[in-house]
Image: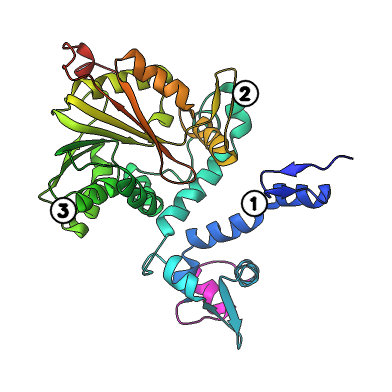
Amino acid sequence: MPAMYSPVLDSPIADVDEFLEILTGGYRPAQVVLTACRLDLFEHVGEGATAQELAARLDADLRGTRILADALVGLGLIRFEGGRYRNTALAQDYLRPQGRHSRVARLRHAARLYERWAGLIESVRTGRRASDVVGPSAMSESRLDFARAMADSARSGARQTAAALDLRSARTVLDVGGGPAVHAVEFARRNPRLTVTVLDHPETLEAAAETIREAGMEKRIRLMPGDAFEVPLGGPYDLVFMSNVLHSYSAEANRRLLQRAREVLTPGGRVALKDFFLESGDEHGKSGSLWNLLFAVNMLVNTDEGDCYTEEEVLGWCADLGLEYVQRIPVTPKSTVLMVTAPASPPPPDSANSGKR
């Protein structure tokens, strides 16, 4: 039999049965960790707890608590010493809501995604998001919870993005779908003369306000509550920035959004589009990195019309709107920024900047 290569392992497959076990058994450690986070187990372990004490603190079954805790010991997240469970340094700092580097919001979001992915078969059959097919999730997520989870996962990428983009000539930026404002804060930090407007839904902007306040950027970053397809955008802006926005919408909706962005640019202004782009293809079939291909599945499960698009598709939309390609900027292993610019003369007025989705 010829050698087979696995993108999951990033190596040849030596044993098919072992490979299938890895491929299909990943839910086990994932569910153990996500369940522990949902129960706040790492917080309840505290300075140490016996199985009986931990079960009482969790208001859970003793046998169930002991089995879950033992699995966490096996995963190296807690220790069992002298009849008591204790957090490792990793769990203490990252897996408690009050930890110094807490990632709990991100993990709770992952738990919600896990539940929705269980409806993937129905999403494939119907083309509809899982919650529409299998019913509302028992773990529904508010926009604020989602924004806080995105803040957890986006900070490192935001720093890399801000370092990669040359904004020295810009004075005004509109961050469309700016969520928790982590990009806005990094842009402002690196560019002292820059002011940033963050546009997102009102509940989401509660998380943005927290981020901005913690950074001491209240005078340089303003919040614009509303729907990006409907709210007057103000401007003009030297840069309109969209991070992980395009994949939430259909191609037609993205064209409308890009048209609105174009209309509020200064002459010669730019649009920066950061996303999980695929490498080639169209609606008949696409290729790209495994992570980005799986993210497209995430959009199938979680959105009405979302998808991952190729760079060629997105640049085609831009060209149709008179936005000219400037450069491609890889910023993380998963994300790329496509930079486009408006002609020096402003476009004629169009209804898209005040119209409906």
* Tag 2 residue: 125
Circle 2 — which element? Answer: helix
Which residue is farthest bottom?
82
Circle 3 — which element? Answer: loop
- Does the segment drawn in magenta span residue 265? no
- The image shows residue 107 at horizontal and vertical percentages of 47, 55
Mark 3 closeness class: few <14, some 14–19, many ≥20 residues within 10 Å: some
Q: Residue 46: which quarter of the image?
A: bottom left
Find out whether the residues at labels 3 and 2 contact each other: C-beta distance under 8 Å: no
Q: Residue 98: which quarter of the image?
A: bottom left
* Tag 1 residue: 27
Find out whether the residues at labels 1 and 3 contact each other: C-beta distance under 8 Å: no
Q: Which residues are magenta?
A: 46-62
Instruction: Specify whether 6 is left or right of 103.
Output: right
- The image shows residue 120 at horizontal and vertical percentages of 60, 34
Which of the pair 214/61 is nearer the observer? Answer: 214
* Tag 3 residue: 217
Vertically, is 267 above or below 72? Answer: above
